Image (cartoon, grey):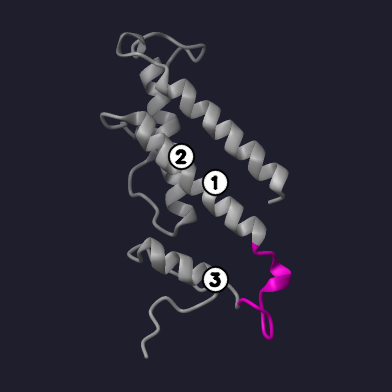
Amino acid sequence: MASNDVALLEDSLSKTGAIISGVTAEQLQLQTPCSEFSAEDIINHLVGWSNGFAGRLTSNPSEVDPNAYKAGADPTAEFDSAAATIVGLAVGKSMLKPEYRGPDKFFAEEFPVSTTDTSVEHLVAFLGRDPHWKA
């Protein structure tokens, strides 16, 4: 992903988060241009899919269907957290180009991780190291 693509992604997610945070409790049941969805349904959809993308990017996919997701008490915080994960990984992946990975290069190929690995283990794996290596 080129840096301008990352900036566009970050800007889009930031603006979406601002829209979510601007919706008041009184507005949640209002209709939207999608006649079958209220404002709350759209927020749940956005948060659910953002969490789903963030989970898949970190090899920690959710078992929850993003189309059936119900946001918690602070959907803005949920969305912003998922957006930060998405953007952070996009930045990292855009900076560590394929020509830097491989034998006799600075970084090995990305190491596979499991859904139970921590964020630090994901980072170590992204850098091409075995996150479960023991001395």
Give the answer, above or below, for where 60 lies relative to 9.
Answer: below
Classify mark 3: helix, strand or loop.
Answer: loop
Alpha carbon distance from label 1 to label 3: 17 Å
- The residue singled out by tag 2 in the image is 50
Residue 53 seen: no
- The disc at residue 87 is 1
> Magenta residues?
96-107
Classify mark 1: helix, strand or loop.
Answer: helix
- Is residue 109 toward the left or the right of residue 52 in the image? right
Question: Which three-letter amino acid code belongs to the residue tagged 1?
Answer: Val
Residue at (38%, 22%) from the top-left corner? 41
Of pointers 1 and 3, the one earlier in the residue sequence: 1
Question: Which three-letter amino acid code belongs to the residue tagged 2?
Answer: Ser
- The residue singled out by tag 3 in the image is 127
Disc 2 versus disc 1: nearer the observer? 1
Which quadrant would the C terminus be assigned to in this image? bottom left
